[in-house]
């Protein structure tokens, strides 16, 4: 994890999953995007709903925030950290990078 950018790569996330590390996933994409591809264990809150639903975020481990390419999730991480959720980190490249580099069976768009 890069503390300066507060992000991890898809390779790091795969390692975390393989090691059964404790972390949570937050998907900030739109509902229509979730129909194409998603992590089954991700909590979905669209970016525009996040301020009103931040209380839904539970846990003490890292909160990996994901979106399509990593731009909206980076915005979400900045907002979350500014509002006290210091465990939030961005998935660089988003689900597109995951599908292309880790799991080619995942849908892309």
Image (spheres, rainbow, N blue to C red):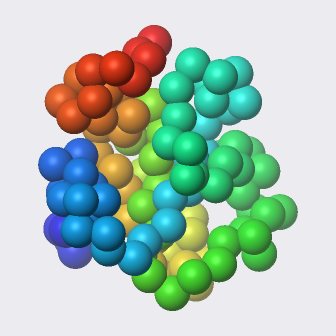
Image location of residue 74, percent across then percent down: 42, 52
Name the residue located 44 percent from the left edge and 17 percent from the top edge: 107
Image location of residue 101, percent across then percent down: 18, 30
> Looking at the rendering, in which quadrant would you find the N terminus?
bottom left
Residue 4 placement, left or right of 80: left
Name the residue located 83 percent from the left edge and 63 percent from the top edge: 52
83 and 91: which is toward the camera: 91
Residue 21 placement, left or right of 108: left
64 and 52: which is toward the camera: 64
Name the residue located 52 percent from the left edge and 26 percent from the top edge: 37
Image location of residue 40, percent across then percent down: 56, 44
Residue 31 placement, left or right of 107: right
Image location of residue 97, percent across then percent down: 27, 31
Q: Is residue 3 visible?
A: yes
Q: Is residue 75 visible?
A: no
Is residue 70 depicted above or below 61 in this figure? Answer: above
> Looking at the rendering, in which quadrant would you find the C terminus?
top left
Is residue 36 depicted above or below 11 in this figure? Answer: above
Is residue 66 depicted above or below 90 in this figure? Answer: above
Considering every residue shown, the one lying at the far right of the view is 52
Is residue 12 depicted above or below 71 in this figure? Answer: below
What count of labels does the image hold?
A: 0
98 and 3: which is toward the camera: 98
Name the residue located 23 percent from the left edge and 68 percent from the top edge: 19
Q: Quadrant of residue 69?
A: top left
Q: Quadrant of residue 46?
A: top right
């Amino acid at each position: 994890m890069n503390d300066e950018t507060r992000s991890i790569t898809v390779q790091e996330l795969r390692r975390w999953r393989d090691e059964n590390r404790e972390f949570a996933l937050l998907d900030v994409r739109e509902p229509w995007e979730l129909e194409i591809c998603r992590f089954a264990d991700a909590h979905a809150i669209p970016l525009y709903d996040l301020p009103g639903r931040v209380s839904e975020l539970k846990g003490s481990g890292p909160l990996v925030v994901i979106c399509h390419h990593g731009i909206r999730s980076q915005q979400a991480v900045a907002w979350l950290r500014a509002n006290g959720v210091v465990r939030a980190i961005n998935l660089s490249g988003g689900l597109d990078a995951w599908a292309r580099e880790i799991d080619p069976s995942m849908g892309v768009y």
